[in-house]
Image (spheres, helix red, strand yellow):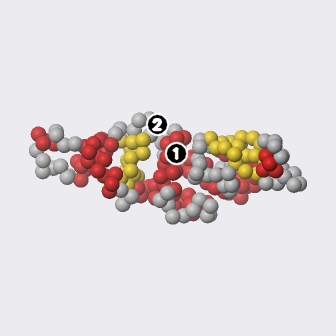
Amino acid sequence: MQCWFGNIHDYNSGRNVGDWIDIEDFSYLTSYLDAIDDLEEKVKEVTKHREGAEEWWIQDFEPDFSPFLGECSSLRSVLVTQEIIDELWNRGFKDESDAVSIIFYVDERVSTCIESETKEYYDAFFSFFDDSYAGEYKSKEDWAEDFLHQTGQLSELSDQLKYYFDYESFAEAQECDGITFLNLECGNVLVLHSW
């Protein structure tokens, strides 16, 4: 993830002073306080921090994380977002837009605020994600067929009748019962449940 940090004083004076910072360069898992200090020093450097011009803001994100992160997000929030992206990458979600979709979905359902302690938020995020993860499938229909076979719900139907079962309609009906299908860039769907 990259963020464009700018100096508020200079912006208000008609100049746009700042630069892009690659947040991947500041991992906090080894030392959170060092990462915050290092990132803060880099922000001061790119925003030309000086007496009377100490305040900075985030003018842009790549990928776009608004409204999850905003102009006044803390460095702590930026770092924990990067750590979540890294962990999702390690779990096989290699496309940034997929990570954004997953982060938005989980964040709306996690009771811990990202502005709270980062470790607490990170843990709550992945606890919820792991509990709600129901797999990755080629389509909603593939999920429905797999789900119905695993639960035995179609076992009483003859093979002839199973042929006519509408898996797509069944999957769509499950969206009202707590199943969410997130479309991934690779064409697959990520299936999450809220029960």
In the image, residue 121 above or below residue 149: below
Q: Which residue is under mark 1?
A: 99
Left or right of 45: which side holds 142? left
| Residue 164 sits in quarter | top left
Left or right of 74: which side holds 51? right
State the residue at coordinates (26%, 47%).
Answer: 170
Secondary element under disc 1, as helix, strand or loop, is helix
State the residue at coordinates (64%, 52%).
Answer: 70
Q: Which residue is under mark 2?
A: 185
State the residue at coordinates (70%, 48%).
Answer: 58
Query: Residue 127 at x, y = what percent?
Result: 47, 59
Graded by Cα atoms within 10 Å as few (under 14), some (14 to 19) or many (20 or more), the crowding at tag 2 reads few
In the rendered structure, which disc, 1 or 2, sits on the residue that comes first in sequence?
Answer: 1
3 and 52: which is toward the camera: 52
Q: Amino acid at mark 2?
A: Glu
Secondary element under disc 2, as helix, strand or loop, is loop
Left or right of 4: which side holds 183? left
Residue 28 in view, yes or no: no
Quadrant location of the C terminus? bottom left
Task: Tell me how far mark 1 sits from mark 2, CA to CA.
Answer: 10 Å
Query: Residue 162 at x, y = what percent?
Result: 16, 42
